Image (tube, rainbow, N blue to C red):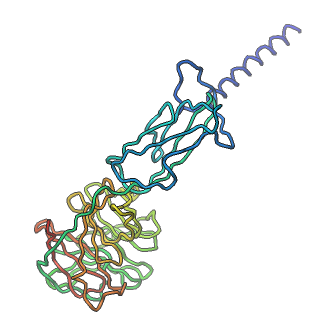
Amino acid sequence: MVFFLYMITRKTCFFSVVLFSLLVFSSGSCDRPDKKDKKLPGSFVRHQKDQTILVRPERDAVFYAGEQIEFEISSADKEVSIDSVCYYLRGKKISTMEGKFFHWDSEGTRVGQHVFRAKVFYNDSLADQHNANFTVLSDITPVKYEYEVVNSFPHDENAYVQGLLYEGGFLYESTGQRGKSSVRKVDIASGQAVKKHDLDKRFFGEGITLFDDKIYQLTYHARVGFVYNKDNLDLVRQFDLQVNEGWGLTSDDEHLIMSDGSSRIYLLDPAYLTQVDEIEVFDNKGMVNHLNELEYVNNKIYANVYGKTRIVMIDPDTGKVLGELDLSKLMPKEFIGDMDYVLNGIAYNPSSGNFYVTGKYWPVLYEIKILE
């Protein structure tokens, strides 16, 4: 009987030790590199009060793309010994450093607002975490482009233009305002719609684009969009939007590219209409907000700035503004200062290399050539 109790007690202790060991080692951080001269501890303890300090960069610091950005972590007192620091950008670890300093080369990075996370390991088994918030501006001054008017055509002055594209000799146009929204196929010479699909009065039409022989259209606040047959504008399907407001829409060979009236541009998967990436748009002075109608041409995104007679040309890889075009001379004088009649609508004709531009309720459509 004594021997039986002894064996049970011995087995219980053994399994308790094994279970304790597994729990301890499974709770350890995989981020901290093993030090050769010290055993890797089982877990890291987060102090309520940080024992390390993020010295640089300062909060809300501003840099230009291409600058070396210096990070410095300091000990709160002499008894704190920093072992290593792991640095993360957009949730992805980019470096592990031993010591207080880290230099990040911002060459080629996206402009905009960045959040770096630094996880600091110290005194063998302790860890702090710091966030560095800073802004990266474009390092280039946008090129000021000129243009010449090649032609002008009549345009439906009842059309509140939200989206414009060129395909096969016709313009496809999306119009807004509830009860008046539509997508239409337009004869350029006459300005008349040869095909038209009216939206339900609940919807406020927004940007359109062509992808895989289908017309995609956004709506304003309804958080839905529509897909149409290109030839007859019959509705093919409806899709959900992941943003509160749909504004401009264009596409490259892989993605739909969307604006929401902010400084952000979103890349969507055409099959499922889910967001796969986003960029922020900045020039060398700061954020470029109110991005509206979009057109993708030769690896540049052309965007109307809402309320302005300005078109900006954006690098889709970095978000930098590469150039800009002032079309104030095309604005009908009677519409100046009226937000219901702003410039909106960009369509590119690849056969001529020219652009079609117009505005909300404008009676004219211009064909322009942008001059290098």
Of residue 80 and residue 36, the one placed in the foreground of this image is: 80
Image: 2 above or below 277: above
The answer to whether residue 91 is left or right of residue 163 is right
Residue 286 in the image, given as x and y percentages of width and height: 38, 63
The answer to whether residue 198 is left or right of residue 33 is left
Determine the image quadrant of residue 145: bottom left
Residue 61 in the image, given as x and y percentages of width and height: 46, 54
x 26%, y 61%: residue: 322
Of residue 1 and residue 370, the one placed in the foreground of this image is: 370
Image: 340 above or below 223: below
Of residue 267 and residue 66, the one placed in the foreground of this image is: 66
Determine the image quadrant of residue 121: top right
Of residue 33 and residue 67, the one placed in the foreground of this image is: 67
Q: Residue 210: in sight, yes or no? A: no
Q: Which quadrant of the rendered structure holds the N terminus? A: top right
Q: Residue 257: in sight, yes or no? A: yes
Q: Which quadrant of the rendered structure holds the C terminus? A: bottom left
